Image (cartoon, rainbow, N blue to C red):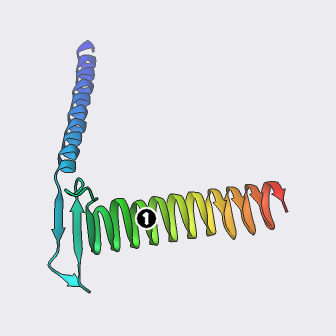
Amino acid sequence: MARSRAKGSASVAESGSALHRFIHGLRHLAASLALQPHEYQSRRRLGGLPMLSINLGPETSDGQLRHARGIIAIGTKATGVVAIGIFSAIGVVALGFLTAGVVGVSIAGVGLLTVSVFGLGGISVSALAIGYIAVGVLAVGMRALGVVAIGVKAVGIVALGRSVRTLFALWR
């Protein structure tokens, strides 16, 4: 019995060291990739824009963020129909830290439909949501649903508006 327990604890220690090596390897890979600029543009074009544009890496020699522009754009900054930007993205569908587009998924975004932490849009689903239809912890809009909801029609635990459904009405 004592040997089987020792084996069990040894395998746990080994898996811990394997996990440690894996995490260390991922950190090393991420640091290596961050230092290496990578730029690619597909030969196929639509309306003068490449179908796929990738521009990742550190700032350019003149201090500007690398910018991918294409139908599908992936970069530090990205502009395209589908834009995926590490820092910012502008496009019909945009994904990044800061976004502007018809549909945006971000930390902070502006668009017709935003899903983010801080969102401003026609329809905003965010922690702090501002829009015609706003859903979030704090929701401000014509129609608002949230923990705190402010709007013409508001539904929330705390609500402020003309027509409210709430546990605690601040003003009717």
Residue 158 versus residue 73: which sits nearer the camera? Answer: 73
Quarter of the figure with residue 159: bottom right
Q: Which residue is mark 1?
A: 99
Residue appearing at x 44%, y 68% in the figure: 100
Residue appearing at x 16%, y 52% in the figure: 36
Residue 4 versus residue 77: which sits nearer the camera? Answer: 77
Across and down, in percent, residue 30 comes to: 23, 46
Residue appearing at x 61%, y 62% in the figure: 135
Residue appearing at x 25%, y 61% in the figure: 66
From what the image shows, is residue 7 above or below residue 45? above
Q: Secondary structure at mark 1?
A: strand
Give the farthest residue toward the front. Answer: 62
Across and down, in percent, residue 104 comes to: 45, 67
Across and down, in percent, residue 18 comes to: 21, 33
From what the image shows, is residue 153 above or below residue 149? below
Q: Which quadrant of the rendered structure holds the N terminus?
A: top left
Q: Which quadrant of the rendered structure holds the C terminus?
A: bottom right
Residue 9 versus residue 159: which sits nearer the camera? Answer: 159
User: Along the horizontal axis of the image, is 155 left or right of 86?
Assistant: right
